[in-house]
Amino acid sequence: MILKVVLEASEEGGFTVSVPSLPGCISEGETREEALTNIREAIELYLEPVEDDLPVTPDAELLEITL
């Protein structure tokens, strides 16, 4: 999966990075590399389903797909 991210220098120092296609998925780091590493982790957590939150009825199937 390829996502576009916005990397910006923070006024306080370091960098802030966000993912426009994933509202609220934002991270930061002291360096560009750290910020990009952190946003990868944030994306993984954002996309990870929380099984307790899934509305699955008894006759439904819960499947995984690869993008």
Image: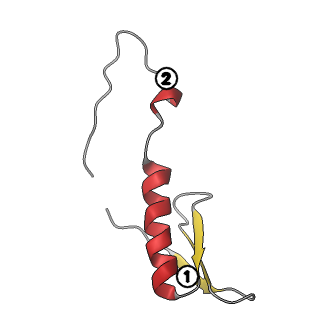
Q: Looking at this view, is 9 or 38 the one in front?
A: 38
Number of labels in the image equals 2
Q: Looking at this view, is 43 or 3 the one in front?
A: 43
Q: Amino acid at mark 2?
A: Pro
Query: At 42% from the left edge and 56% from the top edge, which residue is drawn?
Result: 44
- Residue that sits furthest to the right in the current view: 12
Query: At 68% from the left edge and 90% from the top edge, which residue is drawn?
Result: 13
Query: x, y percentage for residue 28?
Result: 59, 75
Query: x, y percentage for residue 5?
Result: 49, 74
Query: At 45% from the left edge and 63% from the top edge, which residue is drawn?
Result: 41
* Residue on which disc 1 sits: 7
Dot 2: element: loop
Horizontal relation, residue 47 to residue 17: left or right: left
The answer to which of marks 2 and 1 sits earlier in the sequence is 1
Q: Which mark is residue 55?
A: 2
Query: At 49% from the left edge and 69% from the top edge, which residue is drawn?
Result: 39
Question: How dense is the environment of label 1, judged by Cα within 10 Å: few (below 14), some, or many (20 and up)?
Answer: some
- Residue that sits furthest to the top in the current view: 58
Q: Quadrant of the N terminus?
A: bottom left
Q: Quadrant of residue 16?
A: bottom right
Q: How is the image coloured?
A: secondary structure
Query: x, y percentage for residue 33?
Result: 45, 84
Q: Amino acid at mark 1?
A: Leu
